[in-house]
Amino acid sequence: MKKLFLSALLALFVSISGQAHASAATSAVQAAINSNNFAGIDSYAAANPAAQGEIAMYLLQQAKAKLASNPTLAAKLFEAASAYVAQIPAAQSTNAASLIASIVNTVNGAGFQSSNPDAASSIFAAALNMSNQPNILAANPNLYATVLSSANVFLNKNPQAANKKLKDVVSLAQSAGTPPSTNAIGGNVPSVE
């Protein structure tokens, strides 16, 4: 009975400390957003690596919430999330993939693109990076191809609006090959073709 009580108490403590940690992460990130200090998000994430997945989810949620009212801020939030998406736990990856897909679907609209070409360009570039992360690929294997197709259509319709980052990411994705990997002793690893 004593072991059961101690186990329950330990589980409660872990649950409470996890919630406090998540609250601290979202509070710190929200404070950085409110002060337009996106470097503060990176600083907090670097000091709290265990919170990076939670930070990514929060930024994705905030980007989706701000997309209609403040597309420029939404694009900044979405780009900020890109650095931490790989740290989202498997249990939340499906939700993250759904948020990314939802944001891309909104940006895919001609009205959004014509009104917010800079935000659209930034969001497509970040979405390509995020949708290629292993946890997001596992949650939605078709998302990367969908985002690449949408980004390519945007580039073809709005070449002057696309930023260099988007052009580079799409170009790399469409290239026939990738740079060769190097092994531990510095030699090239032959590619299989």
Image (cartoon, rainbow, N blue to C red):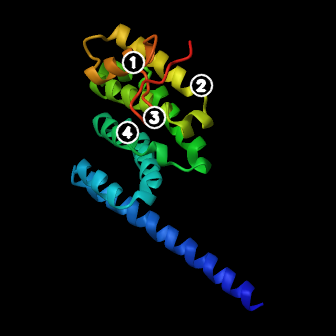
Q: Residue 179 sits in which quadrant?
A: top left
Give coordinates of residue 24: x percent, y percent.
39, 66
Which is nearer the eye, 132 or 177?
A: 177
Label disc, if present, on residue 108 of the rendered structure: none
Which residue has dot 4 on it?
Answer: 78
Q: Establish if 11 lies above or below 191.
A: below
Going from N to C along the chain, the mark reached first, 2 or 1, is 2
Question: What element does badge 2 sit on?
Answer: loop
Question: What element does badge 3 sit on?
Answer: helix
Going from N to C along the chain, the mark reached first, 1 or 3, is 3
Label 2: how many Cα within 10 Å (few below 14, some 14–19, many 20+): few
Give coordinates of residue 157: x percent, y percent.
36, 8
The residue that appears at 37% across and 23% down in the rendered structure is 112
Which residue has dot 1 on it?
Answer: 172
Give coordinates of residue 69: x percent, y percent.
34, 38
Question: Which amino acid lies under the numbered mark 4 shown in the image of this protein?
Answer: Phe
Going from N to C along the chain, the mark reached first, 1 or 4, is 4
Give coordinates of residue 118: x percent, y percent.
27, 25
Question: Which amino acid lies under the numbered mark 1 shown in the image of this protein?
Answer: Leu
Question: Which amino acid lies under the numbered mark 2 shown in the image of this protein?
Answer: Asn
The CA span between labels 2 and 1 is 18 Å
Going from N to C along the chain, the mark reached first, 2 or 4, is 4
The CA span between labels 1 and 4 is 21 Å
- Do the residues under discs 1 and 4 have CB atoms within 8 angstroms? no
Question: Which amino acid lies under the numbered mark 3 shown in the image of this protein?
Answer: Met
The CA span between labels 2 and 4 is 20 Å
Label 3: how many Cα within 10 Å (few below 14, some 14–19, many 20+): many
Pair 1/4: label in front: 1
Which is nearer the eye, 115 or 131?
A: 131
Which residue has dot 2 on it?
Answer: 142
Looking at the rendering, in which quadrant would you find the N terminus?
Answer: bottom right
Label disc, if present, on residue 130 of the rendered structure: 3
